[in-house]
Image (cartoon, helix red, strand yellow):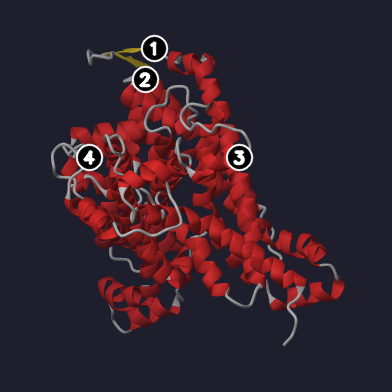
Amino acid sequence: MKRAGFSTPWLPVLLLVPQLAIIAIFFYWPAIVALHSSFYLQDPFGFGSTFVGLENYTHLLGSAEYRRVAVFTLTFTLLVTFFSLALALLLAVKADKVLRGAKTYRTLLMWVYAVAPPVAGFIAVILFNQSWGPLTELFGLFGHTYMVGVNFNDTAFAMILASVWKQVPVNFIFFLSALQSIPRSVREAALIDNRSASGRFWDVTFPLLAPTGFFLLIINITYALFETFGIVDTVVKGEPGNNPMTLVYKVYVDGFRGNDLGGSSAQSVILMVLVLALTIFQFRLLERRIHYT
Amino acid sequence: MRKPKLSTVTDHAVLIAGSLFMMLPLLMILQMTTIPDTEIIQTGPTLQIGDQFDDNLEKAMLQASGFSGENTGMSMLKNSFILGIGFAVGKIVIGMTAAYAIVYFRLRFATLAFWLIFTTLLLPLEVRILPSYEVVQRLGMLNTYQGLIIPLIASATATFFFRQFFRSVPEELVEAARIDGAGPVKFFVDILVPLSKTMIAAMFIIMFVYGWNQYLWPTMITTDEDMYTLVRGIKQIVQVLEGAVVPEFGRSNMLAVVAVIPPVLVVVFFQSWFVKGLTESDK
């Protein structure tokens, strides 16, 4: 960081204090509390707590229920990430190509960015309404009685559909801006070298989009893990039961509803480690990120 | 007239299909706000537009759906605006000042401050939700706007964004300002802030939408119905209105529409700023 800069001693401190105070109180303190209480067993009636070492963790990792939720979260994350990236890429490539109505398409394809996840879940619940939901009727035509909240796979599908719908716009915006920043000269050179449009796409455009793709991959994984909370909560209508749920939702259910503070904190810590791993992976990828232009 | 090529036709077909995929769910919700509830429970959403829109709007905005009689659509709309604007302004002010200190000053503990701040990018609020709740409870900030907004600000996205931007501002500007005798405060207010106008606008849009759409945190922090935001209220609305003898779909869908319209309008109208801010924040 090479900056001429000012050397007033007190001003920068004053400027940094609000930010540092807020993160100390609302970030570091809670994070330390989570770490601390993950080693304790909390009395459910509030009469103190006992140190149990790693018991909360071993209990979690040995629990079939936790493994079930982890497996679902993994599947859910993979499907949501794959479909929202693939759909967005397809739409961005087409939107970059057309001349007529390009702006209108762009607006129509990105406004859902501003829709809150629980509203997306709310819409999914209506689409799959038991007695008259349009998608329930569509599945009915194929002889499947769709039951959100009762059938595990049906509920999972509704969640995935809502999550993909909500996430396509972000990916679309990033892919489109990456496509538009590909220099004209590169496109023209490709046009001379390669006659087939799909050949040009896979050999030239796709590798050029790779850095954006990697960046979005991390963004989408984080989205599927954390930000889908509102979708999960509205689709299962706050009644987890045997319904599919994600790891973050379980942290909330166990800690807030079940009053299992130690177990919930241990789950938080596991998620923190997961996010840290993802971030380190992202930084290593970025370091090796190839720039063609 | 030139005959359109086959590939152009398929391009448009794909884009139209994509647009319909994005639009139809909202259009369905909108249609359901225009027909009587008794009709919805028989047929569900249809293609015809009814005349109940005004009626449902009035019920949704002015009548409470909860027990305390205080969570009318109007009060939730007000809270949503307070959360969205308060969050965006707080985040920008704190982010800009912190980024200014980090980029433009020679500080002994600059690296430490930098890492303390940027570690917060790693852990979303969702992961540390319970201990955060306890801290807010201990500070007596449950059911307050401060308790709602400040903990959400405890992450460095805006600081990081402004740091990137400040570093792209030519160094000669600071030197010129210093030669002209401008102090750090004057430089910030008269030069840096006007230069950052577009960035501030872009950040404001992104942060407003982010704050408006918060769900988990408001769900935990606000239990008084007069503190509900639209997005936080959505589950409750669904349970109360659609659990009635004649489920009030018209009203609940209207509230969902009201929850969606303001952020969507902001994003659509300030599209170019918003897209620029989003793609340049490329972490």
Q: What's the amino acid at mark 4?
A: Thr
Is A76 drawn above or below residue A199 in the view shown?
A: above
Q: State the residue position of label 2.
A: A262
Determine the residue positioned at 35% across, 16% down: A40
Query: Which picture quadrant has residue A238?
Result: top left
Q: Are marks 1 and 2 in contact (CB under 8 Å)?
A: yes
Mark 3 and mark 4: Cα distance apart in space? 43 Å
Image marks 3 and 4: residues in contact by CB distance under 8 Å: no
Badge 3 marks a residue whose secondary structure is: helix
* Amino acid type for the residue under numbered disc 1: Val
Camera-side mark, 3 or 1: 3
Q: Position of residue B194 (x, y in %)?
A: 33, 77
- In this rendering, does residue B29 appear at all? yes
**Circle 4 chain:** B
In the picture of the structure, the residue carrying the numbered disc 4 is B222
- Rendered image: mark on residue B226: none
Q: Quadrant of residue A106?
A: bottom right
Q: Which residue is mark 1?
A: A52
